[in-house]
Image (spheres, coloured by chain):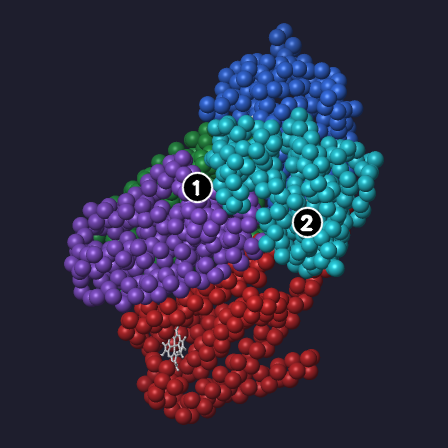
Chain colours: A red, B cyan, C blue, D purple, E green
Amino acid sequence: MKRGFTLLALVTALLLSFALYEALIAAPTEQTMGNVQRIFYYHVPSAWTAFVLFLINFVSSIVYLIRRNPKADILALVSAEVGVVFCTVVIVTGPIWARPVWGIWWAPGDIRLTTTLVLWLIYISYLVLRRFSTSGRTPVIAAVVAIFGALDVPLVYFSIWFFRTQHPSPVIGGGGSLDPRMARVLLINWAAFMCLAWLLSWTRYELEVAKRQVEEAQALESLLEGSR
Amino acid sequence: MAEIQLNDYAVTADGVVKQFGRFAALRGVTAHFAAGKLYVILGDNGAGKSTLLRTIAGLAQPTRGTISVLGTTSIKNLRAQIGYMAHPSLLYDEMSGIENLRYFAGLYGVPEARCREAIEAVNLDPDLERLVGQYSQGMRQRMSLARAILNDPKLLLLDEPFSNVDFRSAHEMAALLAKIRDRRETLFVVTHQPGLLQSIADEFVYMEAGKITDRSSKLRTTEQ
Amino acid sequence: MAEIQLNDYAVTADGVVKQFGRFAALRGVTAHFAAGKLYVILGDNGAGKSTLLRTIAGLAQPTRGTISVLGTTSIKNLRAQIGYMAHPSLLYDEMSGIENLRYFAGLYGVPEARCREAIEAVNLDPDLERLVGQYSQGMRQRMSLARAILNDPKLLLLDEPFSNVDFRSAHEMAALLAKIRDRRETLFVVTHQPGLLQSIADEFVYMEAGKITDRSSKLRTTEQ
Amino acid sequence: MSFLEITRATLAKDIRLEWRSKDAINAMLFFALLVVVIFSFAFDPTAEESRRIAGGLIWVAFLFAAVVALNQTWARELRNQVLDAYRVSPAPANPLFLAKAFGNFIFVSVLEAVMTPLFVAFYKLRVLGPAWELIPIALLGTWALVINGTFFAAISLRTRSREIMLPLLLFPISIPALLGMVNATTAVLTGEESARFWIALLMAYDVVFTTASLLMFELVLEAE
Amino acid sequence: MSFLEITRATLAKDIRLEWRSKDAINAMLFFALLVVVIFSFAFDPTAEESRRIAGGLIWVAFLFAAVVALNQTWARELRNQVLDAYRVSPAPANPLFLAKAFGNFIFVSVLEAVMTPLFVAFYKLRVLGPAWELIPIALLGTWALVINGTFFAAISLRTRSREIMLPLLLFPISIPALLGMVNATTAVLTGEESARFWIALLMAYDVVFTTASLLMFELVLEAE
Ligand code: HEM
Ligand SMILES: Nc1ncnc2c1ncn2[C@@H]1O[C@H](COP(=O)(O)OP(=O)(O)OP(=O)(O)O)[C@@H](O)[C@H]1O
Ligand SMILES: Nc1ncnc2c1ncn2[C@@H]1O[C@H](COP(=O)(O)OP(=O)(O)OP(=O)(O)O)[C@@H](O)[C@H]1O
Ligand SMILES: [Mg+2]
Ligand SMILES: [Mg+2]
């Protein structure tokens, strides 16, 4: 396992530096937006990565409720945390991009922006709940909230669907016309981000496992001490 | 065969661990308790007595290990046969005693007539219109006991029934427990005043730091 | 002359009535308590023991009647000489013991060094970094006592210091109270476990329904 | 007793208790009134555009009033830990949830019934679209707030800082419902477009979350 | 210790404890964020008219967030009844009040500092009047909310249903202050008129209620 981890770390580092080169230097400059457009290679892959992580959170929450396997719980926690990080990147890069291009920081009522924002809020409240829980069965409660959150997402999507949107339409599979060179850079970046997310989640997973072991040991200690 | 053997025990705990976040309140409790006896559970503050009782009552699930009660591990299906009394009264302060019991009788599907019986059993007046919130502590504890015995439970779990109760009420309650034991029901009583039950108890169970450390049929002399 | 006579009494109550809405918790308490003794206050739940203690501490004003403490009726000016310990701990759960005491020492204008002394007096470790919220009940009660004696009070009021405390801690605390009494301070202790103080107490004060009904230097045999 | 009977008994008990201590209802009504007044001071009601923002104003006011009301949902069951008495009984979990949700629905509806005429008066609202549509919108919207509010209030029972936890969980999840209510109301008020889509959205929301709540409430109730 | 020293020590203690449980601060910040988001969904920011009511929106949002925060003011002192420990000490009452008011001022200011840029971004606000005037308006307005909020939070300690009592007391009294804040802010945002009058009003309000609070806080603290 140690080997696998090192290998993954190596691949991630290589991919990330290659992707950086591709995004900032190799990719063609966009005609109307200029160099600002390069933020695209961070913005979009982050969004996709966050979606994947939230999906993992949803699935592992269901698995936890059925199997009661603590590993599923840790996976749910970790994917939500890392997902929130990537989602934050989207929410920060978006306005940075929007300011020069649209002339505003935020386009209220926009479907993509709003869905992302709500997604971000939901998973933050999920993490807050986990912190504040005093229950002996926090994983169950957290899983329930995760499922509620996931059920909410399509409803949010439809509710905003009604508005017209300022945000660009999907490029992949949406019949959009993206320069194939740009598409290539985009995919390389996405691969790099997915590797990074995997690496982060793995580290966080191991950390959480270790933390729980330590806590159990501490519990024993404090109990023995407390009996005095 | 195994089924029958289990049934001889009112409660069987097997390696029960109960964790609250980073803190383990029960750390591997393994024990068998025969039916029809009165057990007094003793131990320092934080030893895990209340937690053990709540786990037996099915109010808290063990983090690890199993508890089987009256021969089954799915305590949920058995709730009609368990009575539980906690330190708080488990009663609505804004209703009278009989109104409280009527509501709970509904939950147990027990006939309403049973409510009066239960109240009389604890030496209170079923027609008292005063709200439970205006009861004295001793009355409240007794009404709480009435609620716990409403369904004629086979297994009665009492958490510090005498704490903050005055001397007279405490003795009355102890006498009542003796009567219940004599009906061959199983009782678990957590208390810091074991002297009150000295003559009634069948066994004293000592807990320490989330474990059962000792069981004996006599009270240790230091704690009398 | 009257001045001097009053000073011999630590506490004088004269027809004290304390009403909560329509309910009278104290119904005319008249009594004199000499200084330098340990009084144990006993009585059923709701007898008004805690209310009496809070009135003496100046936390509640009597509806009618007067209370004079250490020779004066304006208890407010006397607060530096009173120590009060209630059933709740009166400590911040999120601070360590010494941090708590340091804050209160500031309120009393007592030097910080006194904090360590007080903690050591109750047999705790002043360098313990654990937060009070993580203490066991016994430790918490003792720390609470440390807070009450921080200002070396002439008059120490303790409300159920032993309740929910395990056997060992309770005995340790009783021993500590004996020591304090021997320093000629006046103590009032409300408790339902008078046995713990049997050998130490100077006088047992019995309350019933908001009145003092009896005072004797021996514990009634029924309550031992 | 059957599922429905337990629901009925629990709801009846809640309504009876609520009625007995009318204080809470009166306080909430007064609070609702104050919210409208505060809004009318903050947003000058003479402004021409008020009709277009009235939908938002009304529902935000309802939302804040509802959060305060919903936070009290389980308060009564927590006092004296009566909830545990329900949990040790053989009654299933969902009747309790439904009774609480219905109770909240009635309560919040009453609040809305008080606030709406005030809003109409302050902002001189006239309905330009099909007015009858406001009734399903109000019912569906209120149920959307209440069903998740009741559920998340139960979840916040198991957390620290309970009061603040409820809005933290409820607000993000309620965003589609809020959009539905506000836009449907505005559509009807201005008469510029059809509210059909938004009503359908509210229905979908209600169905999804009512189902989810009923499926998962037992998990929450038992998660100690 | 002197008046100022006790104020400082109490404030330092509160800030230290708040800092120790950063979770609570983070939860409040998240709540503030949610309020802004909810408002932005209820009042479509692209609509021309919602920008004109931005002054009202911002202060109503601040008010709701502040009420939630203010409700926590005394929570820490109530747990374990630490407030009684302050009351039995010889320290005067006002330092406690001032420390709490300053603490709340800092806390609410932080909330506002987080919410304001979000409002600006969502509603594309541009300031047409003298922007620097917004700073005294914010400071005076916040102090107006906080001084009365702290005082009334102390009053609601002595009542049932505490959470709901605070807004019931605070909202009516705050109406002049709210008018001042909203109109001053709108005046500066639109640049159509001078905010001088409203700023003077806020100043008068602050002076009057700060003086009144300091004169009467001791009465509130001792009223048991
Ligand atoms: C202001 C905050 C913004 C947020 C929260 C945001 C959010 C997102 C999200 C969640 C996605 C992926 C969703 C999907 O693939 O359907 C996305 C994709 C994208 N965004 Fe943004 N965005 C923002 C601003 C912008 C701006 C200013 C631009 C450029 C004008 C932009 C251009 C794009 C493009 C081109 C895509 C890829 C489209 C696709 O393949 O789906 N975004 N954005
Ligand atoms: N819900 C909970 N969350 C966190 N910790 C808990 C919870 N319930 C109990 N504990 C902890 O578990 C330990 C055992 O608690 P328990 O109430 O079982 O002790 P006990 O033996 O009943 O003590 P006491 O005599 O004081 O009642 C204590 O240290 C307590 O702090
Ligand atoms: N703040 C209050 N408001 C209303 N009633 C009160 C209040 N404080 C006490 N009482 C009532 O006054 C009576 C006496 O209360 P007190 O706490 O003094 O009794 P006690 O002798 O200490 O009883 P216990 O042994 O249960 O502690 C009780 O009936 C109680 O309900
Ligand atoms: Mg216990
Ligand atoms: Mg008392």
Residue B162 to residue C222: above or below: below
Q: Position of residue B155 (x, y in %)?
A: 66, 45
Please state which of residues D150 and E173 is positioned toward the viewer in this rendering. D150
Left or right, D13 with respect to E1, comes to left
Residue B211, percent from left and from top = 75, 51
Q: Secondary structure at mark 1?
A: helix
Whole-Å distance between the Cαs marked 1 and 2? 31 Å
**Residue E37: x %, y % from top left:** 37, 61
Q: Is mark 2 within 8 Å of ligand 2?
A: yes
Name the disc covering residue D13, or none.
1
Q: Is residue B157 left or right of residue A114?
A: right
One can see residue C56 in this view: yes
Q: Is residue A53 left or right of residue A180?
A: right
The residue wearing badge 2 is B52
**Badge 2 local density, few (<14 within 10 Å), some, or many (20+)?**
many
The local secondary structure at tag 2 comes to helix
Q: What residue is rendered at 66% in x and 56% in y? A: B72
Q: Name the subunit of mark 2.
A: B
Q: Quadrant of the N terminus of chain A?
A: bottom right
Name the residue nearer the viewer: B217 or B110: B110
Q: Quadrant of ligand 1?
A: bottom left
Q: Position of residue A173 (x, y in %)?
A: 39, 86
Give the residue at x 43% y 78%.
Answer: A43
Q: Are marks 1 and 2 in contact (CB under 8 Å)?
A: no
Question: Looking at the picture, which amino acid does disc 1 mark?
Answer: Lys
- Residue under the image location 61 percent in, 55 percent down: A136
Quadrant housing residue C177 = top right
Tell me the number on the disc at residue C114.
none
